[in-house]
Image: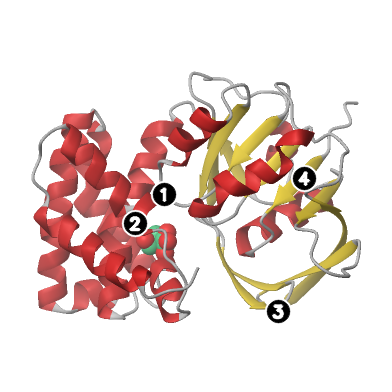
Amino acid sequence: MIHRSWHVLGAGAIGSLFASALHKSGVPVTLLRRPESEQSRTQAIRIDENTHSGEVHLPVSYNNDFEPIDHVLICTKAYDVRSALGEIAHRLNENSCILVLVNGMGVMDELSTDFPNLLFALGTTTEGVYRLGDGHFCHAGRGITRLGMEGLVQPPPWFSDWSRTERSCVWEPDIDETLWQKLAINCAINPLSALSRCNNGMLLETAALASQIDAVCQEISLVSRAAGYIQTATDIHRKVASVIASTANNRSSMLVDVLAGRRSENEYISGYFLKIAANYNIPTPHNKALFEGISLLDKQTKT
Ligand code: KPL
């Protein structure tokens, strides 16, 4: 029996869902936190699902503590990963596994520059979970979590910690295409819903918004084809329509950020897409206008 342990950096909605799931399946889990004022060394996480509510109590370690970290799940906002990892870098080594489960793409470009000796795995999830209060979350929709590492077709031993949890987790041999597909869906839905301040469903119910979705998807398809993401190039219109239908009553994460006056992850979603489009000299005026609209809102936030 191998005794692995996991640390979780960024215990927001998604981080807490997986911290709780790993703990419940018998894996020791510790939450990482900034050493701010007098705080307790344990934290309760409560997750409601339908009529059930489950609570777990997890130990807390401060980022500036010294015990080494073997496996860490990072679930911060995309723009915080780099500095958050910097705060725990002294506890990591070239054998540590660092699993980055954040929105958007482009974080890896930053991390491989700053931390060339560390080993990273990446992931994306369609689990729907939102915050109700401090350490209290609602698991509103079950989804699938796809994890992978560049060039690794078969899962590494640590993946069994994930496959044994109550959550549905699969190993993805081509994580890059999977992340791109999620990015493409986010590029279509998130900025338009945030600028229009509407639930996802309205994007196809209103003719003017539906034609914008179509134009944005057209550009995404062209760029995806040029970049070699053939599945996304072929499927994007259908995929976006299906995600809009299945999340019709939800607010996109970008709309939630905008309504909370928080900086959005625009640079790691549309911003990353525009960089790739520019690499192939493909004009993407619709995506660019959405990016610029959200950038203006981001400039008004304090974070
Ligand atoms: O991932 C999403 C988000 O809100 O960030 C969905 C629901 C897919 C919308 O793009």
Q: Evaluate whether residue 171 shows in this view.
A: no
Quick one: SS at disc 4? strand
Quick one: SS at disc 3? loop
Is ligand 1 closer than 8 angstroms to the Cβ of mark 1?
no
Image quarter of residue 54: bottom right
- Pointer 4: residues within 10 angstroms few (<14), some, or many (20+)? many
- Residue 176 pos. (x, y %): 40, 32
Left or right: 205 in relation to 96? left
Q: Nearer the viewer, mark 3 or mark 4?
A: 4
Residue that label 2 marks: 186
| Residue depicted at x 38% and y 50% | 268
| Residue depicted at x 26% and y 35% | 231
Kindly identify the amino acid type of the residue bearing the numbered disc 2. Asn
Q: Do residues under tags 2 and 3 come within 8 Å of each other at their CB atoms? A: no
Q: Nearer the viewer, mark 4 or mark 2?
A: 4
Image quarter of residue 100: top right
Kindly identify the amino acid type of the residue bearing the numbered disc 4. His
Is ligand 1 closer than 8 angstroms to the Cβ of mark 2?
yes
Quadrant that contains the N terminus:
top right
Kindly identify the amino acid type of the residue bearing the numbered disc 1. Gly
Q: Mark 2 to mark 3: distance in Å?
A: 30 Å
Q: Earlier in the sequence, mark 2 or mark 3?
A: 3
Residue that label 4 marks: 7
| Residue depicted at x 22% and y 30% | 227
